[in-house]
Amino acid sequence: MEMTSKGKVILALQHVLAMFGATVLVPILTGLDPSIAILCAGIGTLIFHLCTKGIVPVFLGSSFAFIGAIGLVFANEGIAAVKGGVIIAGLVYVVMAGAIKLFGVEKIRSFFPPIVTGPIIMVIGLRLSPVAISSSMYDNGEFSPVFLLVSAIVVITMIVISVFAKGFFKLVPILVAVIIGYLVSLPLGLVSIEEISKAPLLGFEVKALEQIITLPRFTLSGVLAIAPIALVVFIEHIGDITTNGAVVGKDFFKEPGVHRTMLGDGLATIVAGLIGGPANTTYSENTGVLAVTKMYDPSVIRLAAVFAIIISFIGKIGAIIRYIPEPVMGGVSIILFGMIASIGVRILIEAQLDFAYSRNLMISSLILVCGIAIEELPIYGTITISGLAIAALIGVILNKILPTDI
């Protein structure tokens, strides 16, 4: 279906809305500035598309995997040490991209067949589901009927538009749902009008400018705390690119190649480190948008990246989006995260895997339970490994050592 310029603008804004909540949350939790994180997401996405020949519809945002390490280094050593650690993490990505190029995509693919990638993708969506429910129903840990009402309206709006709408409106269920949710939230007192009014019209706040101009400092403790996490995120990157390819119906392992997608993440993270933002990664939220809208044009993602850059410089617009009420984003997330988990199920069905074989049962069972139940495990000091990475490692190892005929 041919998309008009106006249509692309609306779809791009929808992608910005989808990534905004999570991208802003990371700097809020670590002490970094949200506007810089938005700027880094936009610039990083354009870098990614340059590295991947502009054919992979991926949006980059702040990586949750680095929250603990960045927060600790920022508190103990300041923004300069954080910048140094993030830059080295980006270099680790680049080195890994070179290794993938050296050994070949088929060698890498053999570690990630459908019996591994299907459950991993399911885990990616299901691990995020408690966040969606919490945002939809709970206000500071207390059950809120008001939150539930708003999130339910958002979910119902998305369902009605996705299923029953015709033409262009069928492509923008998220945008319409957010607008309706915002309007419903206004009389309920859920919109931070005072915070929006205090935001500057243009430019960054002083704190943000200080973070931008501070030169990076490469301390041993900062680098050791932040950089090794890139080794863990590699497996999550494989899962995200696999998910994106499954949604779009293309094999991005072959073209442009996973070495290019990893290089895109790495260069984007290096730039983020130089500016003062968190490490970048591919965003499941935006893959969910692709799944809902079935509009896979990468140029829409690039337009969204440009909008993110512009928004980072416009305080008022950034504040309006930054203060989208929590239950509104929670309602949207319920659908998006569920779509991601459902894509994992689709991969298993399309591969026609026979679960009468104990091998398949054991691999999928361990991936699902470990990936969902384990939040993170400590490795050394403040360095941890996520349950998703643990589950992926278990799946990869079992797939290689278990016979295929049992």
Image (tube, grey):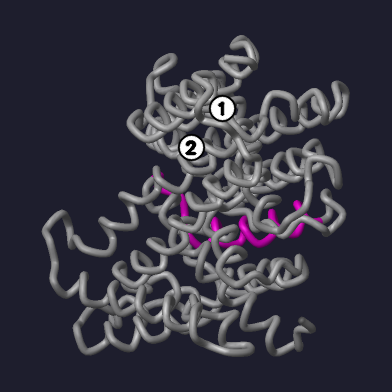
Q: Position of residue 227 (x, y in %)?
A: 59, 27
Q: Which stretch did the figure color magenta?
A: 30-49
Q: Which residue is mark 2?
A: 65
Residue 310 lies, with reference to residue 388, above or below; the image says below
Crowdedness near tag 1: few (<14), some (14–19) or many (≥20) residues, C-alpha within 10 Å: some
- N-term mark: 1 or 2: 2
Q: On the image, which quarter does residue 100 sit in?
A: top right
User: Left or right: 259 with respect to 83?
Assistant: right
In the rendered view, would you say 157 is above or below 252? Answer: below
Q: In the displayed structure, does residue 65 sit left or right of residue 107?
A: left
Q: Is residue 144 magenta?
A: no
Element type where label 1 sits in the image: helix
Q: Amino acid at mark 1?
A: Val
> Which numbered circle lies on residue 232?
1
> Residue 13, image x and y in percent?
59, 77
Q: Is residue 93 above or below residue 281?
A: above
Image quadrant where residue 193 sits: bottom left
Alpha carbon distance from label 1 to label 2: 8 Å
Residue 23 x/y as whole percent: 49, 56
Dot 1 and dot 2 residues touching (CB under 8 Å): yes
Q: Nearer the viewer, residue 303 or 319?
A: 303
Q: Quadrant of the C terminus?
A: top right
Q: Horizontally, is 216 left or right of 91 in the view?
A: left
| Secondary structure mostly seen in the magenta stretch | helix
What amino acid type should be assigned to the residue bearing mark 2? Ala
- Whether residue 221 is visible, yes or no, is no
Tell me if I can see residue 305 in this picture: yes
